[in-house]
Image: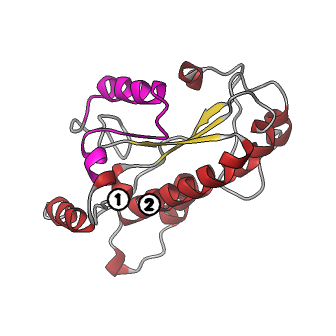
């Protein structure tokens, strides 16, 4: 089932970052263009911001649109279509930083925290109509998100862990520090925040 995440009959290019779907999205969502009912959200985009400077940065608006508005609009747009599918799933990608933020990335962390909250509510509401809602909560992973970096969990290792948890039917997948953050007490989260933001 979860292998279908990466399979589509054709790529549908769309902007889910505004309330109105892009051209052809409503038709595509209703037609047979989607080979699977499992549609993951992209991981998002990362920016850095110095809030004390109070600058109006267009990148902030884009970051909020990509990381939060996009998954929200996509989920709401596709619900009518998914209700007609067998074993439908919505998968949102948040972050371990949804639970313990890094102060240098305030907008990214805030959008991921909001997406976590939205996903909890979405799961609760859609359980009544048979749509499964999964939250994928990655730790730092060696990818080019926010610029190429060599720290974090190797991508293949993390992908294998996610697929194994999805196969077990977990509604929330976590790994390494994101597991600890998602299960931590408030005092533990405060300690993690102080540790991360000493850098």
25 vs 16, left or right, is right
Does residue 160 sit above or below 121 in this rendering? above
Q: Nearer the viewer, residue 126 or 189?
A: 126
96 vs 4, left or right, is left
Which residue is located at x 33 percent, y 29 percent? 158
Does residue 79 sit above or below 87 in this rendering? below
| Spatial CA span between label 1 and label 2 | 7 Å
Snapshot quadrant of residue 173: top left
Crowd band around label 2 with a 10 angstrom C-alpha radius: few (<14), some (14–19), many (20+): many
Crowd band around label 1 with a 10 angstrom C-alpha radius: few (<14), some (14–19), many (20+): many
Q: Residue 135: give its label.
A: none
Residue 143 percent across, percent down from the top left: 34, 35
The residue tagged 1 is: 99
Which residue is located at x 29 percent, y 43 percent? 140
104 vs 159, left or right, is left
The magenta span reads 153-181
The residue tagged 2 is: 113
């Amino acid at each position: 089932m979860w292998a279908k995440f990466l399979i589509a009959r054709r790529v549908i290019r769309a902007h889910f970052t505004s309330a109105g779907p892009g051209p052809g999205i409503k038709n595509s969502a209703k037609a047979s263009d989607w080979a699977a009912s499992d549609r993951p959200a992209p991981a998002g985009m990362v920016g850095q911001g110095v809030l004390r400077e109070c600058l109006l940065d267009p990148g902030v608006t884009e970051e909020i649109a990509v990381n939060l508005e996009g998954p929200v609009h996509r989920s709401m747009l596709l619900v009518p279509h998914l209700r007609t599918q067998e074993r439908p799933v919505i998968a949102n990608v948040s972050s371990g930083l949804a639970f313990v933020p890094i102060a240098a990335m305030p907008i990214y962390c805030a959008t991921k925290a909001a997406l976590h909250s939205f996903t909890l509510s979405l799961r609760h509401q859609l359980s009544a109509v048979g749509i499964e809602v999964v939250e994928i909560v990655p730790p730092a992973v060696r990818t080019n998100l926010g610029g190429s970096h060599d720290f974090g969990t190797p991508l293949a290792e993390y992908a294998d862990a996610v697929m194994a948890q999805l196969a077990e039917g977990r509604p929330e997948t976590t790994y390494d520090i994101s597991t600890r953050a998602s299960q931590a007490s408030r005092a533990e989260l405060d300690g993690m925040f102080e540790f991360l933001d000493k850098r």
